[in-house]
Image (spheres, helix red, strand yellow):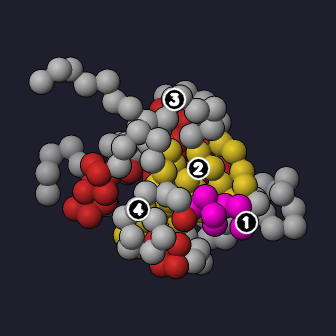
Amino acid sequence: MLKGIDQRLSAEIVHALMLMGHGDDLLICDVNHPAVTIAKETTYGSLIVMAGCDIPTGAAAILTLMPLDTFVEAPVTRMEVVGNPGARMPIFDRMQGVVDAAEGRPVTMQSLERFAFYDAAKRAFCVIRTSDSGPYGCFLLKKGVIDLPPL
């Protein structure tokens, strides 16, 4: 273990976060999502498992290290409910609370139709599958910039 890093964050997750650049997307999803299939098409190329976490817990841990992008209007994207795009699932509000708390501000979350979401997910940097049972637990988080002091 290392100081200051949430124990839910494996070495592989921290490695993937370190490899990501500004504007790269991370997909965090539930166990129902076709994660392995989609992960094969991402930059990272394989699935990262975050066992023992639900999506809000996993996302909160990830967001202790990864800032969300402030250069785009909506740095978080979720999948719409099939056949009822305006429907609200409980996970949507739980994740809204997580991202707002992590950023210390209201964060805009946009939605995409199921197959458009899958296409966007294939362009993500990596896929992290939690143990969350869903449904509709899939979110793209766009990485932002950290203003670091010069070396």
Q: For the residues marked 1 and 2, what is the alpha-carbon distance in whole angstroms? A: 18 Å
Q: Which mark is residue 87?
A: none
Identify the residue shown where x is 46% and y is 65%: 42
Identify the residue shown where x is 57% and y is 40%: 75
Q: Is residue 68 above or below residue 14?
A: above
Q: Which mark is residue 95?
A: 2
* Residue denoted by label 3: 70
Among the two numbered marks 4 and 1 on one chain, the one whose residue lies closer to the N terminus: 4
Quadrant of the image occupied by residue 90: bottom right
Indicate the position of residue 55 as horizontal and vertical percent values: 51, 60
What stretch of residues is rendered in magenta? Answer: 115-121
Q: Is residue 12 above or below residue 46?
A: above
User: Which dot, 1 or 2, sits closer to the camera?
Assistant: 1
Q: Secondary structure at mark 1?
A: helix
Q: For the residues marked 3 and 2, what is the alpha-carbon distance in whole angstroms? A: 18 Å
Whether tag 3 and tag 2 are in contact, CB under 8 A, the answer is: no
Which residue is at the front of the view, 141 or 98?
Answer: 141
* Residue denoted by label 1: 114
Sort mark 3 into few (<14), some (14-19) or many (20+) by Cα contacts within 10 Å: some
Q: Is residue 63 visible?
A: yes
Whether tag 4 and tag 3 are in contact, CB under 8 A, the answer is: no
Q: Is residue 10 visible?
A: no
Q: Amino acid at mark 2?
A: Met
Quadrant of the image occupied by residue 1: bottom left
Q: Amino acid at mark 1?
A: Arg
Q: Secondary structure at mark 3?
A: loop
